[in-house]
Image (spheres, coloured by chain):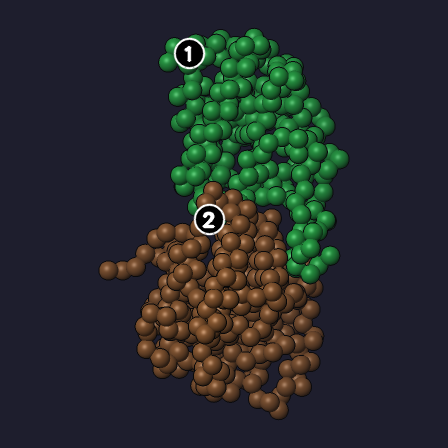
Chain colours: A brown, B green
Amino acid sequence: METPRSFSGGIVTFYSFKGGVGRSMAVANIGRLLARDFSSGENLLIDWDLEAPGLNSYFRVRPSSLGLVDYFSDLVEALRTKGLYEALQSEDRGAILDREIPIGKYLVDTATPRLWLMTAGPTDPARLGEYQKKVAQIDWADLFHRYPMALRAFREMLTSRFAYTLIDSRTGISDTAGLCTAILPDRLMAMFGPNKQNKPIFQVVEAALEFRRMSDDDRPLIAFPVASRFDPADLLAFQSSLMDFRYDFSQLFARVYNLKDCDLTEYFDQVLLLYVARYGYGDGDVVDHGEPSYAGSLRRSYEELARWLVERSGPWSAI
Amino acid sequence: LIHQLELKLWLANNKFHHACFISWPSLGGPKIKRLVAKLEQAIEEDAPLYGLPPSAFSDRSIPKGADWESTMSRALCESISMIAVLGPECYNSDWCGREWAGMLRLEESRLGSADRAILPLVFQPLRSDATAGLLQLEILPPPVKHLQCVDLSRIRLRRSNYEESDEFDDIIRNITARIADIALRLADLRASAVDCAGFVLPAESAFAEFKQAVQRYPFLTES
């Protein structure tokens, strides 16, 4: 029987306020699952963690010579010199952008069928200096202020070319984090370890949702909290802290989405990413070559998360 | 049923031809146009159940060649209530501001301080300059902030095609019931719309002092 789809394609950002919660590994494995089990089209992963890139390390890919910063450097150049911005005022701006700056040359094949990767930049260590300069040169706020339609065109191009685009966002509070959480996504996966250091995730999620609510962008933005780094050896402390996070997220969603009831119990029971130390040493491929899927395994957790993402209209929602 | 028939007859005799006048910014684009079309259709379906005229007026129904200003003025005057679809474009629109000012004048002469005839429907809030932590706060112009608003923006945030949802149907039912309450109050006060031929929309927009460009603050870190 075909599963119901609430979300059959779009842009999904994985964000965490702090690092070390397994965000990039989740992007890599959810990407594999979506490409393999949930879509027949092409899918894309983007490494937008420009200060600390590394999504490519979760795949056995050939070295990349071009990536996200190269794409946006070329885009800014075309906007400044080639009159591209005027063309992007048209309704088919996504197709125009793809014709002018074909995204294909900035991608590498992940070896998983129908799954592509856009690295942050060149992966050759010898080109790190050049990469650093390009990162410093891109002024994201200026790009959005001066050329708001360019980011919209980029988003529309992604949506028309790829079934699912997963973005591995920068942590903390920054222009790129704002771009990844508030402006680009259809769904926002808010990852956290249930501890004090991760509490600011609530402010970032609320700011992203309120930004979208007040923006011209007519797309819904659905946030999914994703608890991570669950160590079964520390079950009691984890459970207690997790309940606090669950309660605070349900209060936040009830307020921002104006929901009469927001019960996240089922969702939090099913979506919980384990901490498995040994995956820190390999390529983190849990889905294709890792452990078998059994109740409580990391692989099962990813599968549950992918299912919620695709099949439900929100973390509060029944099928 | 008798109550509804009485109300229907009284409204017809007193020249209230429209259950509501829908004020909306045409610059809001297709998404607002779609909402207005759906509002018109849904209210026209629900209105007769309450004894209200089966008409929701919007400028979409003005025929080509008609005198725009006099048609709008007369339609507003012949309406029991006004639904104001509010978004940033609305506060920049002279027409929306004049319609608000016009209904305010009618409301005061017909209902006094007994009731309100404007029903604000917030489609998209306007961002203010003020922030609280990472949050940018929303702002409502003075004429609006005294009224209880129906907020569509939170439903839009969590569902596409919200106009097709049961939740939206409930909103419409509540709005129509509210229009029926206003109609009953008009009947109680013997307020009529018989001399609408002479009514002219005020020249001044109710949002004149608030008029501003649509603000765009893209980034969370931006002050």
Disc 2: which residue: A262
Per the model, the C-alpha gap separating discs 2 and 1 is 40 Å
Q: Position of residue A267 (x, y in %)?
A: 41, 58
Q: Position of residue A258 (x, y in %)?
A: 51, 44
Q: Position of residue B31 (x, y in %)?
A: 51, 44
Residue at the image position 75 percent from the left and 35 percent from the top: B209
Q: Which mark is residue A69?
A: none
Tag 1: amino acid: His
**Can you tell which quarter of the image residue B23 is in?**
top right
**Place of residue A300 in the rendered image (x, y in percent of width and height, measured from the top left):** 36, 70
Residue ranking furthest to the bottom:
A126
User: Which disc number belongs to residue B3?
Assistant: 1
x 69%, y 69%: residue? A139
Is A289 displayed left or right of B93 in the figure?
left
Pointer 2 local density, CA inside 10 Å: few below 14, some 14–19, many at least 20: many
> In terms of depth relative to the viewer, which is nearer, A251 or A258?
A251
The residue under the point 63% across, 41% down is B89
Disc 1 chain ID: B
Q: Quadrant of residue A74?
A: bottom right
The answer to whether the residue labelled 2 contacts the one labelled 1, judged by CB atoms less than 8 Å apart, is no
Q: Residue at x 42, y 20 (%)?
A: B50
Which mark's residue is nearer the viewer, 2 or 1? 2
Would residue A156 be visible to someone looking at this image?
Answer: no
Q: Secondary structure at mark 2?
A: loop
